[in-house]
Amino acid sequence: MKHKGGGTICGLDEAGRGALAGPLVAAAVILPCSRQFISRRAGFRLRDGKILSPKQRKKIYSILKRVGATIEVEIISTRSVNNHGISWANREIFRRLIKKIEADRFIVDGNLKLGRIAGKTGKVKSVVDADATVTETMCAGIVAKVERDTIMNTLHKEFPQFGWKQNAGYGTKRHILAIQKFQMTRYHRGIFVTTALKNFKMGIVTEGA
């Protein structure tokens, strides 16, 4: 959608950055309509996807498809996260998306410095809490979360003991206890798990969103 004085905005956000298991997933979204229009179609207020229920997020994603929103999704595997680190993965996944899509402005959630991107460097801006304030970025976060939850639900069938269908790979108490009992799988992030186990012994449990 064209914005006053700013042209077309592409919002970008990720899901799974702080998880102990599973891939990093990010999405880019350009909207053909307003936040109010999507909210009316949904029957509830469009807002930060972390506040919405899984059912609400799926409904928003379905609406985005029906109204013809431009949607691109990128995935970086657990193996790549383990090999290169989450900081690399977080930058790389957004760089890939920006290269794939055309817009006048790119609003990325967070405070990342993505470096030079041929022909687009000056169009990219990282904004803290953009997933709660910029409609396109808000929708990108919802898309990324739905896509990643779908992946984790599938992986749950292979390793149900870790409860990924419920915790999406984040460091819940059940997940950490399961790692202690069954050990890590190829879908776990080694450094993240090591840190989580140390924190757990000290009574610290961080359950991501």
Image: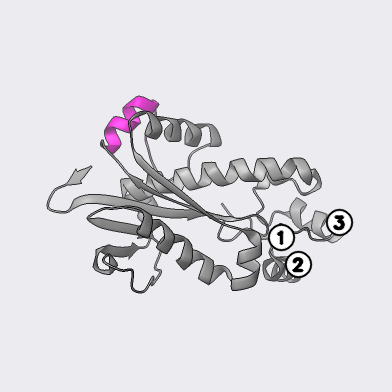
- Cα separation between marks 2 and 1: 13 Å
The residue to which callout 3 is attached is 182
Sequence-first disc among 2 and 1: 1
Q: Main secondary structure of the magenta part?
A: helix
- Cα separation between marks 1 and 3: 12 Å
The one nearer the camera, 85 or 102, is 102
Sequence-first disc among 3 and 2: 3
Query: Which of the labelled discs sits on residue 188, or is there none?
Result: 1
Sequence-first disc among 1 and 3: 3
Q: Are marks 2 and 1 in contact (CB under 8 Å)?
A: no
The residue to which callout 2 is attached is 197
Location of residue 110 by image quarter: bottom left
Q: Around disc 3, counting alpha carbons within 10 Å, would you say few (fewer than 14), some (14 to 19), or many (20 or more)?
A: few
Query: Which residues make up the magenta segment?
Result: 34-45
Q: Around disc 1, counting alpha carbons within 10 Å, would you say few (fewer than 14), some (14 to 19), or many (20 or more)?
A: many
Residue 68 pos. (x, y %):
33, 33
